[in-house]
Amino acid sequence: MLKMGLLSLFFHFLFLSISSGEISSQVGINYGQLGDNLPSPEKSVKLIQSIGAKRVKIYDANPDILNALRGTDLQVSIMVPNQHLTNISTNQKLADSWIQSNVLPFYPKVKIRYLLVGNEVISSSPKEIWYSIVPAMRKIKNALNTHRLNKIKVGTSMAMDVLESSFPPSNGTFRSDIAYPIVKPMLQFLSRTKSFYFLDVYPYFPWSTDSNNINLDYALFESRTIKYTDPVSNLTYSNLFDQMVDSVIFAMEKLGYPDVRIWIAETGWPNAGDIDQIGANIYNAATYNRNVIKKLTAKPPVGTPARPRRVLPSFIFALYNENQKPGPGTERHFGLLYPNGSNVYAIDLSGKTPDSAYEPLPKPTNNEPYKGKIWCVAARGVNASELGSALSYACSQGNKTCDPIQPGKECFKPDSLVWHASYAFSSYWSQFKKTGATCYFNGLATPTAKDPSFGRCKFPSVTL
């Protein structure tokens, strides 16, 4: 009887280990491709393996990348791009065709395990696409089932802005415009198919917008003394990451789905940014990513206060600094690697390297808000034709944005495209920064703390 009992116990644990293999604590990496100077897919796969990643997520189904992943042990997440969702949501044949073109030629030699239908659709796409998310997920799942590809989990990624309330965590609530028409049907699908809620979590952003009230060490997992106790749940938090994740868990609970598993689809910290972007530096990025990897790979699993001892599978963002990502400077500086393949800082996604083995990090110099004036000028070496188009765009916006660079006016001379564009960019940015405008112009502009004004020509600026 004892032997039978032990044998039964052995098979029980064997079953558990097999059935939970897909949610091991191994950390993956997000492999974005928005750069014109990135290594080949073949070299990229070797670099991914060299930093200890066991999974990789791409933002499409790039055949060159999938071919480079063929025969490796890396688990792979692919994606249906946002622009395809509307058509797929109403056409099963189109969903079948997408699977036939983007999955069947590679599976099972490529270990495709996850298929995301869109990326942060609510945050980045027109409203009419939002309602296509769940129908498209269903059709993609149907297409996978047709080919008996049951191992591939279907989901979609969501940013934190799908919540209308996230503090305290117990007050986590989905936005009223999407909670019932979009999120609840999505949770029903995820629950029924035993998939995951793929969540993008960036403590950098709430900290950087409220650094006076949120302690930096609390955001970096460095605090040993700062604790926050949720007054409703009585759960105690020691870092911002857990607060953010649990606010989503409580929001799901309010819609009747307390048990849908969380997958950290993106998390990271920028290693650089624009002059006015506080805390974006190598020291903080290395500290955050090393600490979050320690948390995510801990054995036994740590989980979060709302779900203790639960594995949080994850992808770190991102493999490379990507020079063609739009938006503020931080968007182009989340990489663990430079485009030449060298480390921005030493990192080991397996979590096995102790902190003592790493070289000292450069001390941060921008952990306090920048105070002073900033201008927006044309970047060096940019395409003249593109610069001329950006100049025309800036001058067409706002109130008398480019009057001073008209012939005979105080900023007309020197009569050069770079000079006129620099004035136009600064003038545009000074008017529209408060409403979200950035000093980027598709990579043609860059912020500067050096006043470009000359003679009688005074450039408008942004004062912080």
Image (cartoon, rainbow, N blue to C red):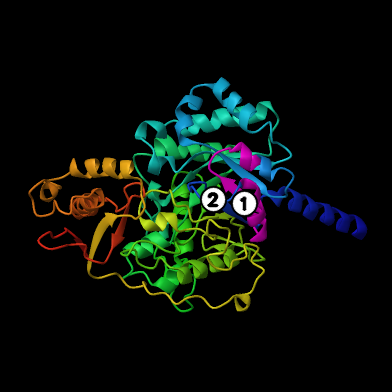
Q: Position of residue 370 (x, y in %)?
A: 28, 69
Q: Which residue appears at 65% of the width and 48% of the height?
A: 42
Task: Classify 10 Å Cα crowding around label 1: few (below 14), some (14-19), many (20 and above).
Answer: many
User: For the magenta stretch, what is the residue range?
Assistant: 41-66
In the picture provided, is 418 more to the left or to the right than 349? left
Q: Which residue appears at 49% of the width and 74% of the height?
A: 222
N-term mark: 2 or 1: 2
Q: Position of residue 296 (x, y in %)?
A: 59, 62
Secondary structure under the numbered disc 1 in the rendered image: helix
In the rendered image of this protein, does residue 367 appear above or below residue 323?
A: below
In the rendered image of this protein, does residue 96 appear above or below residue 446?
A: above
Q: Position of residue 445 (x, y in %)?
A: 31, 53
The label nearer to you, 2 versus 1, is 2
Residue for badge 1? 44
Please name whichever residue, 174 or 25, is drawn nearer the observer in this view of the structure.
Answer: 25
Q: Which mark is residue 362?
A: none
Pointers 2 and 1 in contact (C-beta within 8 Å): yes
Residue for badge 2? 38
Q: Position of residue 25 (x, y in %)?
A: 64, 58
Q: Is residue 163 magenta?
A: no
In the displayed orientation, state which residue is furthest to the left: 408
Q: Give the distance between the C-alpha atoms of the residues marked 2 and 1, in whole angstroms.
A: 8 Å
Task: Classify 10 Å Cα crowding around label 2: few (below 14), some (14-19), many (20 and above).
Answer: some
Q: Which residue appears at 47% of the width and 31% of the height?
A: 85
Please name whichever residue, 94 or 12, is drawn nearer the observer in this view of the structure.
Answer: 94
Residue 171 showing in the rendered view: yes
Figure quadrant of the C terminus: bottom left
Secondary structure under the numbered disc 2 in the rendered image: loop
Figure quadrant of the N terminus: bottom right
Q: Amino acid at mark 1?
A: Ser
